[in-house]
Image (cartoon, rainbow, N blue to C red):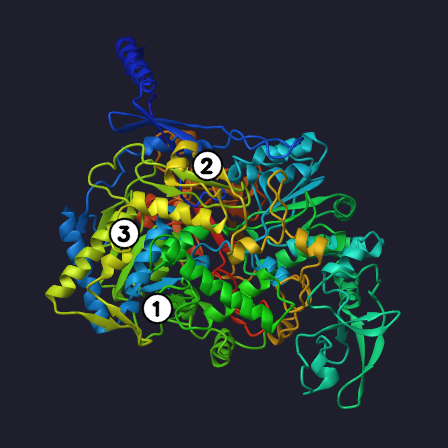
Amino acid sequence: MSRPRPSRGFHDTGGRMSVTASAEGYRSHEGAYRRRWTWDTVAWGTHCVDCYPGNCPYRVYASGDKVLREEPAATFGTIEEGVPDFNPMGCNKGAAWSQQLYDGDRLTHPLRRIGERGSGQWERISWDEATTQIADAMLDAIESGGPEDIVREGTPEIATVVPTERFFNIFGGRAMDLHASFNDFSIGLHETFGKFCPVSSGDDWFKSELILIWHMNPAFTRIPLYHFMLEARYHGAEVVSISPDLNASHMHSDLHVPISSGNDVPFALAMVQVILAEGIADETFIREQTDLPMLVRTDTGHFLRQTDLEGDADGASEEQLYHWDPAEGLTKANRGNLLLGGREIALSGTFTVALADGSQVEVEPVLDRLKRKLDAEYTPELQQETTGVHPEVVRKVARLAAAKRTNIMLGWNSCKYYHGDLMERSMCLLLGVTGNWGKFGTGIRSWTAGTMDGQGMVIAKERPGVEGTEQILQTRDLAIETLQQLDPTLTEELATRELQLRLAGIEGLGGGGAAALGMATGSVEAFWWYWQAGFKERWNTPGWGDDTLPRSFDEYFEEALEKGWWTGVDSPRPEHPPKVLIECGGNMLRRTRGGRTALLDTLWPKLELIVSIDFRINGTGLMSDLLLPAAQHYEKLSYHIPTPHQMMMTFSDRAASPAGEAKPEWEIYGLILQKFSERAKQRGIETYKNRRGWSFNAQDVWERFTLEGHMENEEQMADELIRDAAYIGVVPDDCTLETMRELGHVRLTGWGMSMFALAQASPFEDKLTHTPFRNHVEKGDPFPTYARRAQFYIDHPWFMEAGEELPTHKPNPKAGGDHPLRMTSGHNRWSIHSMNQLNPVLIQTHRGEPLVEVSVADAAARGVSDDDVIRVWNDIAEFRCRAKVAPGVMPGQIISYNGWDPHQYRDWMGANEIEAGMVKWIAFAGGYGQINYTMAEWQPIPSDRGVPCNFEKASD
């Protein structure tokens, strides 16, 4: 039976409609609408959350110190003549955001738990009581174990990043690397390019001739920029959607490829096979940009290295590889420049070379090995049984990709598959053989927040103003200069990456986010889960991982530790359990794969205090001990994530005072640190040390946090931030808080100095669209990979042991048991993760409660009708929600869009409860070029796609 629907304001009175009540309601509504058009002030606003790429400027209208409404500003000018502009920029969430500021789920006063965790029993307390309890718990943790026992999970919620990271740096807490927690790390791009973060500007999509929408649903997730795809199509581009289900983006596509879930690799590799077999590959591009011409020994399968030829001779390097020049014979592959000047090095053939010991060995280019593999395993006909895609569709798309400027619109779905790296490596290979990166309208993308130099300075600096900025810049520049002197082949990008790699080897500096020069202890979150949250048992469960491997998960894990690949970030160990958890900008129980099932029995009992700082009570907040009310957007100052997608810095101002006793995060942390110093003095604690022996003064933390009062409030902090960004050169040099309040947004003026910005490897041009990797293609700058080229052959011992030295297909493991269906997911249309699910406007645009989409055939087989409550289960857990019977869902698939909070489900058990949270063992590898940890890059990340499950109509 369908559930009753709201009455929409009409009252049934014995078959008659209450016209009087309806008319009064109408007049009341009309008056409220008129009042929205009477305002006192107008401010710039945006939504500084992880709505990446976001950055939509709004005008926010307020009256009587209350926000009335917002509207898109649409104030962008033309960037490049002949290319559409960015206007209007906005989405349904942004247009309704103000409706949450004073709604019923708003947290407006500090609350303390008085019942059991999760009992819902709270008492209202003062800020002084709250900060005293937090300060004492922090000091207790420091005295009993050290400041590292005070922990936070990383977050991309940008309004919280600067204050939270600086706060943890000041007292020396433990900061988890953010990337594993939300898992948008495109690991296959990193394995291929040595960096995961190429990003083109949205307007560059207009220049594409073929757009492949792959693991993305841009009509849902790229609402502000989606028009560029439609305009490209009107301009003549062809749009191909590749997915198991029919979603909102398909109605504007020219071709849908209905591929079975998790089987993208055979389809991609079959296209590569067609391109190579038909002789339509871009061989010049292959020679210069990829490792496919590099020589491999036929006896060992490893690259031919200089150490093979010269042994222990001075200067012989394991990283020096070779290719074969028909005119000159065996030739060193240039590690400093990729351009060949017209030379046609060999792409095929077998050659004999003499080794250092006098023996001879045959070598061949990688491309020959690749061709044999593709011809034997991945022809269009062979892939059909696995993918369900007709061979002629493979050939059609392959020929289009070879002939056109091809742009893969990659979302963050592929990286959430257990073997998502293999999927992404295969996609990159398609681009590599067709010459489709480093040129306008081409490429593949993930995400980046590189031009955050102002934010990074405010997090790390020890002195105010230019002096504090110069102190950091001079240290950084000296390090870069030294590295380039040691290795003249290093570009600024490669030297910056090498610096990050070396910092990661210093205990505690590897995971500290933008504040790598700070005092927080960094950790890779996989070790936190393994030792503190019970995932060791899950990751070792037979059948839940890659069953083709010769060794167990723990055997690889122990080898990684023994070889020191993770030294410095492989904590907290079992003997150092966490004591205090501060959640700000996160929602651990919703976001963690496995959620409550994984964490409440393992991690939660170890925590003596859990603090949730938010503008609402989310699923983690309900299981916390203290709730601190944060100011909402429009009630505080912040900047959005500056990204190449829009090439701008966007500002959000305070349009009204925070509701109730809510405060900006900067002020909240300042109050905690003031109380920390006060209680330290009262308890006689002057200094303390962390486990590395670094000393901290307990009594001057507020002074250091605010730079002796120079950044006492968020106004001062926001001004310092934008002035630093201007000084470094990422925004116009006259930018101040005052000018940002006037303009709302400014176009970026340079890449700055961060690793992620320099990774774009393109010139910064003010009047052109941006596409990454132009420097690699136009100038020959090397990639930050072992081979210094886009690398498709990885001869790390673990990759070879797994048979993954080349991209290959492996089925999704049965993590959660052997069940007939596979649960997939995606970002929903009506909420940024969970924070807008209860928006009073948006909730009217969907069914208003958690649901999963199921196919017509699977529903009929189980006697399930649309809107029935169903039970979804596997060997881990179960959850109940409504079924949406959808004809666009492929049989064998169910879809649970993300963002529902646990407490919105029955028994607070959400869809993430049945996710095993498996990490691919190979991501613990190290000691090989790009296969080394650097902040927010190479590391194990959990999977949550293709989850084995089943469903039935709920009986209760």
User: Do we see residue 931 in this rendering?
Assistant: no
Residue type beneath disc 2: His
Label 3: which secondary element: strand
Residue found at x 41% / y 61%: 471
**Reading the chain from its start, which is encountered first: label 1 or label 3?**
1
Label 2: which secondary element: strand
Q: Residues within 10 Å of mark 2 (few under 14, many from 20)?
A: many
Residue found at x 77% / y 66%: 293
Residue type beneath disc 3: Ser
Residue 914 percent location from the top left of the image = 43, 55
Q: Residue furthest bottom?
A: 357
Q: Tell me if residue 63 comes above or below residue 297 in the rendering.
A: above
| Image-based side of 712 in relation to 451, left or right | left
Q: Residue furthest front?
A: 467
Q: Give the label on residue 532, or none.
A: 1
Q: Quadrant of residue 233?
A: top right
Foreground pick, 95 / 740:
740
* Quadrant into which the N terminus falls: top left
Residue 172 percent location from the top left of the image = 30, 66
Residue 343 percent location from the top left of the image = 84, 62
Residue type beneath disc 1: Gln
Q: Tell me if residue 170 comes above or below residue 871 in the rendering.
A: below
Q: Are marks 1 and 3 in contact (CB under 8 Å)?
A: no
Foreground pick, 815 / 125:
125
| Image-based side of 646 in relation to 734, left or right | right
**Reading the chain from its start, which is encountered first: label 1 or label 2?**
1
Q: Which residue is mark 3?
A: 612
Residue 223 percent location from the top left of the image = 52, 35
State the separation of the CA atoms marked 1 and 3: 20 Å
Q: Which residue is mark 2?
A: 745
State the separation of the CA atoms marked 2 and 3: 31 Å
